[in-house]
Image (spheres, grey):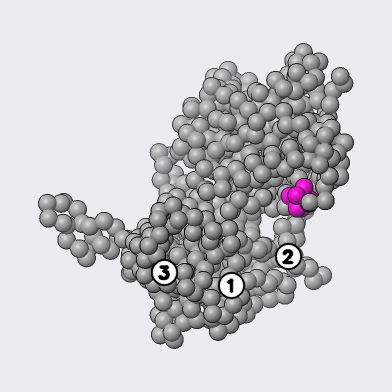
C-alpha cells in the first residue's frame, strides 16, 4: 500500500492542542510522510470523505464546548442530514486534551469519537483522554497514545516502519533581513476606516480610560477595575459576554531575549514559507524583531516539551545536549516537571540556563520554537445600559513566589496593570465574543448569582442590565477575604439594596479570625465562612425561589473547589426544604443544568 497523506486537524483554545498537533506532524515528517496540519475551521470539511488518515486533536472549553477554531466544523459534523457511512473510507484517531477538575472532562473528544463512528469512520484506537491534572500533565496519556497510534499506522502501511526518523526538520519559515532600518508603526493600533464588528483577526484599538486598584493597599492581591472607551468600534455586548485581548511581553524581557539571541531589535525582515504555509496574518511584512518579540512570540510562558525537543537539536555542548534530550524524552518528564513546570520557569529563563545552545539558535526557527501569544478572555463587568460606550473588566493581577528568585507574573494581568492612561493615551486592541452565561428574558424570573472574588464580574454586568430593564428579583452571594480589603463594588450593591433591586448575602472568610474567639479547647478560631455556607444558611429562600418561582441559579469563579461546594450546598437545601432524597436532589440539579436553569462559568 502506498504512503498516505496524514491530515492532523485540531481544535485549540489556548494553544496546547495546536502544539500537540504540530508534535504529531513532526513525527510524521520524520517518517517521510506528507502531512497537513490545520485548525478544524480552516479545513474544507467536504474533503473528509476522500481522506485516508486523519488525527483529530481536540480541547474542551467552558462547560463542554468546542474551541472557537472548530465551532463551524462542529456544527457541520453534527448535521442530521449527513448520511450514515459517509466516512467509511476514513481511518482516524481522536486525541482529547482536558482537565478533570471540570465536570465535562474531555467532552468534545468523546462526543466527536461517537459521531465519527456513527458516520462510518474506522477509529484506529480508543480515544485518548489526556488530563492536565495528572502529576505528569497531559503527556502521561499522550506519550503511550502516540506509541499505539504509530503501531496501528505501521500495521496499515508496513513500509513506514522501515524509515529511520531524521533529526532536525527544516524551519516552517525563513527570515530575510533587510538592509534598511525604518520607523514602523504598530498596525494593531490603527483605527479601521471601514465599519466592521471587531474580531480576532481584526480587533479594535480601544482607548484605556481608567485603571484603578480596588483592593486595599495592605491586601496581598492587586485587583484592577479597568475601563475602555469603545466609541466607534461597533462593539456590542450583553450580560455574560466576554472581552478578548492579546497581551504584550514586557520591554525588559524583549531586551533580554534579543541580547541572548544576539538579535538587533530594530532589524527588519520578511518571512518566506518553506512549504505551503501562509505567513501569519498578524505579522506585518516587513516586520521588526522588536514587534515579533513584543507582540507575537510568547517568550514568558512555561515552555512545553516540544520546545526542549527542538532546542536539543541545536546543542553542541555535550552537557547541555544530554539534559535537553532528557527533558524531551518520555522518561525525563518528572525531571522536566521539577525543573520547569513546578517552579514555573519561563522560556526566557531556560534560554539563559543553556547559553551554549542558545548561542547556536538560528532566527529561521523562532516561529517553530516559540508559540504565538494566545488571546486572554475576561468577563465583562459592566452593561451598556448603565455605561454607554464603555466596557469594564475586573482583573486580579497574577503575582506569586516559587523557588525561583524572581516572583512569577501573569503575562496579561501584569501587562494590563502596567498601562497608565495618566502617562499618555493608551489603546488596547479588543474584540468581544458571546459568553456561556445566558440570563432570562422574562421579567418575573428571579436570578440567584454566586460570585466570590472576581467571579462577581459577570454578575455586576447582569445586575446593571436587569435593573435597567426593570427586573428586580435579584439575589447575589458574594464572598471575599475581608470586608475592608477586597469587597468589590460595595457602594453599588448598597445602592441597589436601598432601591429594593438586590438581596445580598456576603461571606468574608478571613474576618472570622478577628471576630470570633477560638472554641473551647482549640487554639484556632472557628472555620472560615465561604459562599457555600451562606447558600446552606438560606436553604428555605432558595428552595422557594427555585421550586415555586423557577429561579435561575448561576455560579462564577475559580473552578478549584467552590463550584462543587456550592452545588453540594444547593442539593442539601433541596433535601432539607423539599424533603427529597439525595438521589432526587442530584437529579434535580442535573435537570436544571440541562435546561439552563443552572449555569456556571469557572476557570482554573
Q: Is residue 206 left or right of residue 468?
A: right
Residue labelled with disc 1: 440
Q: Kindly report the distance in space between the C-alpha atoms of the residues bearing marks 1 and 3.
A: 17 Å
Q: Position of residue 291 (x, y in %)?
A: 69, 51
SS type, badge 1? loop
Looking at the image, do the residues carrying marks 2 and 3 touch, with CB atoms under 8 Å apart?
Answer: no
- Is 75 within the magenta? yes
Kindly report which numbered mark, 2 or 3, lies closer to the viewer in this rendering: 3
Residue 111: quarter of image? top right
The disc, 1 or 3, on the residue closer to the chain's N-terminal end is: 1
Residue drawn at x 52%, y 43% as measured from the top left: 100
The disc, 1 or 2, on the residue closer to the chain's N-terminal end is: 2
Residue drawn at x 72%, y 42% as measured from the top left: 115
Work out whether residue 259 or residue 138 is closer to the camera in this orientation and state it: 138
The disc, 2 or 3, on the residue closer to the chain's N-terminal end is: 2
Q: Position of residue 381 (x, y in %)?
A: 54, 69
On screen, 600 above or below 106? below
Residue drawn at x 81%, y 15% as measured from the top left: 159
Q: Kindly report the distance in space between the C-alpha atoms of the residues bearing marks 1 and 2.
A: 27 Å
SS type, badge 3? helix
Work out whether residue 98 or residue 177 is closer to the camera in this orientation and state it: 98
Residue labelled with disc 3: 542
Q: Few, some or many C-alpha atoms within 10 Å of disc 2 (few <14, some 14-19, many ≥20)? A: many
Q: Kindly report the distance in space between the C-alpha atoms of the residues bearing marks 2 and 3.
A: 40 Å
- Is 51 within the magenta? no
Residue labelled with disc 2: 198
Looking at the image, do the residues carrying marks 1 and 3 touch, with CB atoms under 8 Å apart?
Answer: no
Residue drawn at x 51%, y 32% as measured from the top left: 136
Segment colored magenta: 72-79
SS type, badge 2? loop
Amino acid at each position: 500500500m502506498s504512503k498516505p497523506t496524514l491530515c492532523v486537524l485540531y481544535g485549540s483554545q489556548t494553544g496546547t492542542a495546536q502544539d500537540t498537533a504540530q508534535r504529531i506532524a513532526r513525527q510524521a515528517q520524520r517518517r517521510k510522510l506528507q502531512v497537513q496540519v490545520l485548525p478544524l475551521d480552516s479545513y474544507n470539511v467536504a474533503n473528509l470523505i476522500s481522506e485516508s488518515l486523519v488525527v483529530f486533536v481536540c480541547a474542551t472549553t467552558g462547560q463542554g464546548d468546542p474551541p472557537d477554531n472548530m465551532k463551524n466544523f462542529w456544527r457541520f459534523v453534527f448535521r442530521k442530514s449527513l448520511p450514515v457511512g459517509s466516512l467509511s473510507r476514513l481511518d482516524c484517531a481522536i486525541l482529547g486534551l482536558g482537565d478533570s477538575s471540570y465536570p465535562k472532562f474531555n467532552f468534545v473528544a468523546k462526543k466527536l469519537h461517537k459521531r465519527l463512528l456513527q458516520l462510518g469512520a474506522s477509529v484506529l484506537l480508543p480515544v485518548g483522554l489526556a488530563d492536565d491534572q495528572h502529576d505528569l500533565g497531559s503527556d502521561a496519556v499522550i506519550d503511550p497514545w502516540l506509541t499505539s497510534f504509530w503501531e496501528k499506522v505501521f500495521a496499515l502501511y508496513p513500509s513506514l516502519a522501515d524509515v529511520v526518523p531524521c533529526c532536525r526538520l527544516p524551519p516552517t519559515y525563513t527570515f530575510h533581513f533587510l538592509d534598511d532600518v525604518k520607523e514602523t508603526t504598530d498596525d494593531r493600533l490603527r483605527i479601521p476606516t471601514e465599519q466592521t464588528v471587531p474580531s480576532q483577526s481584526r480587533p479594535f484599538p480601544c482607548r484605556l480610560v481608567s485603571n484603578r486598584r480596588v483592593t486595599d493597599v495592605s491586601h496581598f492581591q492587586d485587583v484592577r477595575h479597568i475601563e475602555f472607551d469603545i466609541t466607534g468600534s461597533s462593539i456590542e455586548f450583553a450580560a455574560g459576554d466576554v472581552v478578548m485581548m492579546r497581551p504584550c511581553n514586557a520591554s525588559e524581557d524583549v531586551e533580554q531575549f534579543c541580547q541572548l539571541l544576539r538579535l538587533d531589535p530594530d532589524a527588519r525582515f520578511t518571512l518566506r514559507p518553506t512549504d505551503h504555509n501562509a505567513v501569519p496574518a498578524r505579522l506585518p511584512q516587513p516586520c521588526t524583531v522588536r514587534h515579533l518579540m513584543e507582540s507575537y512570540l510568547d517568550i514568558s510562558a512555561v515552555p512545553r516539551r516540544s520546545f526542549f525537543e527542538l532546542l536539543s537539536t541545536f546543542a553542541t555542548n555535550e552537557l547541555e545536549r544530554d539534559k535537553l534530550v532528557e527533558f524531551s524524552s518520555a522518561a525525563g518528564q518528572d525531571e522536566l516537571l521539577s525543573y520547569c513546570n513546578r517552579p514555573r520557569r519561563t522560556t526566557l529563563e531556560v534560554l539563559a540556563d543553556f547559553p551554549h545552545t542558545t548561542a547556536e539558535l538560528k532566527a529561521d526557527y523562532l516561529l517553530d520554537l516559540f508559540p504565538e501569544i494566545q488571546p486572554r478572555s475576561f468577563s465583562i463587568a459592566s452593561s451598556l445600559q448603565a455605561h454607554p460606550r464603555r466596557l469594564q473588566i475586573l482583573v486580579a493581577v497574577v503575582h506569586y513566589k516559587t523557588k525561583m528568585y524572581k516572583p512569577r507574573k501573569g503575562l496579561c494581568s501584569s501587562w494590563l496593570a502596567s498601562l497608565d492612561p495618566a502617562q499618555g493615551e493608551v489603546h488596547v486592541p479588543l474584540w468581544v465574543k458571546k459568553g456561556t452565561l445566558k440570563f432570562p428574558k422574562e421579567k418575573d424570573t428571579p436570578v440567584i448569582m454566586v460570585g466570590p472574588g472576581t467571579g462577581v464580574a459577570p454578575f455586576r454586568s447582569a445586575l446593571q442590565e436587569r435593573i435597567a430593564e426593570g427586573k428586580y428579583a435579584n439575589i447575589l452571594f458574594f464572598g471575599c477575604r475581608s470586608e475592608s480589603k477586597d469587597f468589590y463594588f460595595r457602594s453599588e450593591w448598597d445602592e441597589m439594596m436601598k432601591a429594593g433591586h438586590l438581596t445580598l448575602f456576603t461571606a468574608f472568610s478571613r474576618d472570622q479570625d478577628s471576630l470570633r474567639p477560638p472554641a473551647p479547647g482549640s487554639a484556632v478560631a472557628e472555620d472560615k465562612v465561604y459562599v457555600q455556607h451562606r447558600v446552606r444558611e438560606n436553604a428555605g429562600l432558595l428552595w422557594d425561589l427555585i421550586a415555586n418561582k423557577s429561579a435561575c441559579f448561576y455560579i462564577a469563579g475559580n473552578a478549584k473547589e467552590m463550584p462543587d461546594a456550592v452545588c453540594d450546598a444547593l442539593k442539601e437545601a433541596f433535601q432539607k426544604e423539599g424533603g427529597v432524597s439525595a438521589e432526587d436532589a442530584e437529579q434535580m440539579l442535573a435537570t436544571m443544568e440541562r435546561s439552563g436553569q443552572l449555569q456556571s462559568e469557572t476557570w482554573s
